[in-house]
Image (cartoon, rainbow, N blue to C red):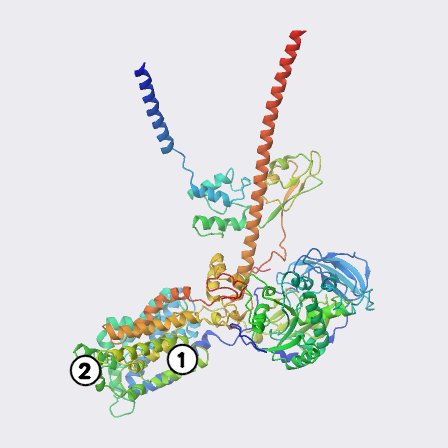
Amino acid sequence: MLIDVGSLAVMGVTLGAVLGTAAKLLAVPVNPIEEELQALLPGSQCGQCGFVGCSQYAAALAKGDTPITLCAPGGKGTIEALAKKLGVSADTHDHVEKGPEVAFIHEDLCIGCLRCIGECGSDAIVGAPKQLHTVISDACHACSKCFKICPTEAIEMRPIPPTIAGWHWSKPGDHATH
Amino acid sequence: MKLFPILGGIHPEYRKELTSEKPIVALPIPAVLYLPLQQHMGAPATTTVEPGDLVKKGQLLARGAGAISAPVHAPTSGKIVAITELTAPHPSGLPTLTIILETDGKDEWAELPAAIDDPFAVTPQVIRDRVAQSGIVGMGGATFPSAVKLGLGTAHKLEILLLNGAECEPYLTCDDRIMREHADAVVDGARIMAHALGAPKIIIAIEDNKPQAIEATTKAAASFDNVSVAPVPVQYPMGAERHLTQAITGRETPARKLTADVGVVVHNVATAKAVHDAVRLGRPLLSRVVTVSGGAVAEPKNIQVPLGTRVTELLAFCGGATNAKRYVSGGPMMGQPLPSLEVPVVKGTSGILALTQSETKEAEPQPCIRCGSCVTYCPCGLVPVEMASFIRHEKLEEAAKIGVQDCVSCGSCSYICPSNIPLVHFFNYAKGRIAALDRERRKTEQTKALVEAHNARLERLAQAKKEAAAKAKAAKEAEAAQAEASGASA
Amino acid sequence: MSILVDKSGPFTHGTNSVQLTMVTVLAALAPATLFNLYLFGWPAIFLFCVTMASCMAAEAACIRIAGGDPSRALSDGSVMITGWLLALSLPPWAPWWVATVASVFAVCLAKHAFGGLGQNVFNPAMVGRVVVLVSFPLQMTTFVPAKPLFSAQAPSFAESLHVTFGKAVSLDGISAASQLGLIKTELSRGIPVSQSMAHLPSLSDMMLGFHPGSMGETALPLILLGGLFLMWRKVISWHVPVAMLGTLFLLGTLFNAMDPARHASGWFHLISGASFLGAFFIATDYVTSPVSKSGQLAFGIGVGLLTWIIRTYAGYPEGVAFAVLLMNALTPILDQHFRPRVFGRTRKGEPLSLKGDK
């Protein structure tokens, strides 16, 4: 009886130790930089970068096998922040800055199906079933998820026109003032 | 009066003689006036008239919106023909909402608010309200709503109202002429402002290249014990708010603070005149004195211009401009290039300059030879050469660390640079870009907060659904059990 | 009508330009140079021309290789200053190839390898001088006493051609040591400075330039005049020259007082060698000295200190060139640490507190 209990106990301890060590050794490493990178991304999981969501893009960035210029909603600011974090130069030359955009719903085409509202990650669309939906421009960050899901193509991504308050001098030499 | 030295600074060619002896002449009222809703720092005004309305001189066209804003009034009588987007008098050349007023030539006054006969007997609030209602903004070019600035006395203990008549920008003589021709109104306006501010002392600072203005204001100030005139040396940028404060009081305004924090508020002399008109006569700000000058202008003049007059008409009144290399609104040092000659004169337009190549001396930039002149002449103690090289390589954070945001864009470094490097242009770019990045970062943060709230809500909903389902199941089971029990009992 | 807005203000500019600055420096150098060319005659004139021509040719070649427009680069005048200063730092009767080698190193290595005008870390003329000084010590330390043009002892035009362009001319018969070299060799033979000074021309003769040395080491009053002219034209400020000469003088005087047998006097340090040329024309080089006034003071003190140390303790009699180069290497660090105080901020960059302390 004592031997039985003893051997089982030894087996239990040994196997437990093996499993524990294995869990430690074979743990999927969570790169701390990954979390930091994810914190820099908008977090709306829009998928415009081609990855499923922001965390997947952050993981790819941490491994260094994807360009840092893919986040459309984040814009140039995010690219520069990522570049700084990763210690690479922000080569924004091949990045075509779309400029700020905002979703706009054409009233005559909207059928009030609620799909865009379900899709919107930042609660920027309000509306009720069978009622006209509308976009709260301030909350929209132009991830275009609603644009893609709208069954009637009632949603348009409109560029936000530049304002005097938001204007600034371009860098000397870049003759693109107007 | 004992003065204190200021750092750096330059002595550009002043060319004030082009207009300094030309008395202010009134411009005949143009057929059409173009009045942007934003002629000031802060929020644009909101219209109170509709196209087709007939308005009289001094009537409110748009009221100030929010805490920092200023109303717009009709400079003359006429008919509102449209309210539309037109090119703004701003280097961006972007459109801005503009009221178009077709004048009728009658120049009929609307009913004006009553004159305040004894401004020193009313509370400061009454004065501030009148100034706000009259649409007065800083007329030296900063265009900050004056009523807001006159409210600084409520939160700060002020000692001095410093009236800025330095007019250190080359070419400009509008303040000089106002001081010579309307010294009494300027001094009276200053006293009213000091009353609103609760500042016991008034000092009128004038660069000593304007002896007649010094004489006229000294005479006007003679009967008031608390008003004195301080001639200051000719040294650009003497008229910069913080530098003038230092020159007169020796007090250095800390970075990111206001001169009010060291007990001084600075207002422009033209603003004082406008306050006088608003308080003593009930007249809102309808026109301003503009110096039209530059080597390309046939007959340079100082002109009393109704707000909303297009630059082309102003130039035509001065015999036209030929061979102009640059058209500038304001002075040549800190003024802004005009995107078009169709833009109107606004409240902050102190000058319209048409400069020839021999005046602008524009040349292709050459490599920096590290002469250090920019460091020597920077009135803010910055190292422009280093900031520019950081900015050239897009290292904006490093540039910010060594103070690019403390730069006042006075232009001394660009002026003195032997290699013609557009240093100030680099700094303007950096300041704007840093602000834009800041806005973008805030937007991303806001989006993140929204997304997190959204996700939390979804989770809560899911949780609630699960609980509800569990509850429903439990209820159903209980019901079933009850039914069974009752069935059994039956 | 819309106007292209491609440039922010200011829309006016001072009259100064790179060219004007360079021409002013050349003008300031001209009197001393002309006097020295007169003192040392045709060989000096040939050497001067060779140096200028090789520097300009090297500049043109470098610009051409980099794909630029040589005429534009030459017109800024910077390479003429390099060539001019280099010529002044060579022994006037040195052979042509010393000048050419020095020029190529000065312009190609010290200037263009670093990116051209404004980018170089080290003073090009001094790099050129030091390269030939360490490579050809014999030619670089063979000085002749002044033999003014048209005087009896001056070499003829043909002889002069031979001196500069001829093959290995021996100047043994007429050569003489510079005063710094003299006291150094005498000291190594155990003769105290106080004694060897007696063999030197009088201080007043030395000041006027009637003594052996590189071209720029003589005619001090004219160099001083040029320096004061530059200060008057605001091309240079007093900071570097005063700091450098002051340090040199103070150290010289101090150590001379402590041990006259071992150390030359402060006055001697001031007027011998390239002290003046270095203080007014070489250490003040814009590109390779700090941009702030406080940095320039530190730079000047450093040059003075190193010059004195090298002259006193190192193997070479003259140390201005080495001192300048060493301090050039420190310029980026000086630039970082010596900045003006920003308006409204403390030295550390924090906003001033409202109590008004600084």
Between C167 and A6, the one lying in front of the other is A6
Of labels 2 and 1, earlier in sequence is: 1
Chain of the residue under label 1: C
Three-letter code, disc 2: Asp
Residue A48 position, x and y percent, is 54, 41
Between C87 and B401, the one lying in front of the other is B401
Please indicate, yes or no, whether residue B376 appears anywhere in the rendered image.
yes
Residue at 31% of width from left, 16% of height from top?
A2
Residue A153 - label: none
Label 1 sits on residue? C26
Please indicate, yes or no, whether residue C128 appears anywhere in the rendered image.
no
* Left or right for B489, reference B107: left
Q: Quadrant of residue A21?
A: top left
In the depicted structure, whether residue B398 falls above or below residue A122: below
Three-letter code, disc 1: Leu
Label 2 sits on residue? C172
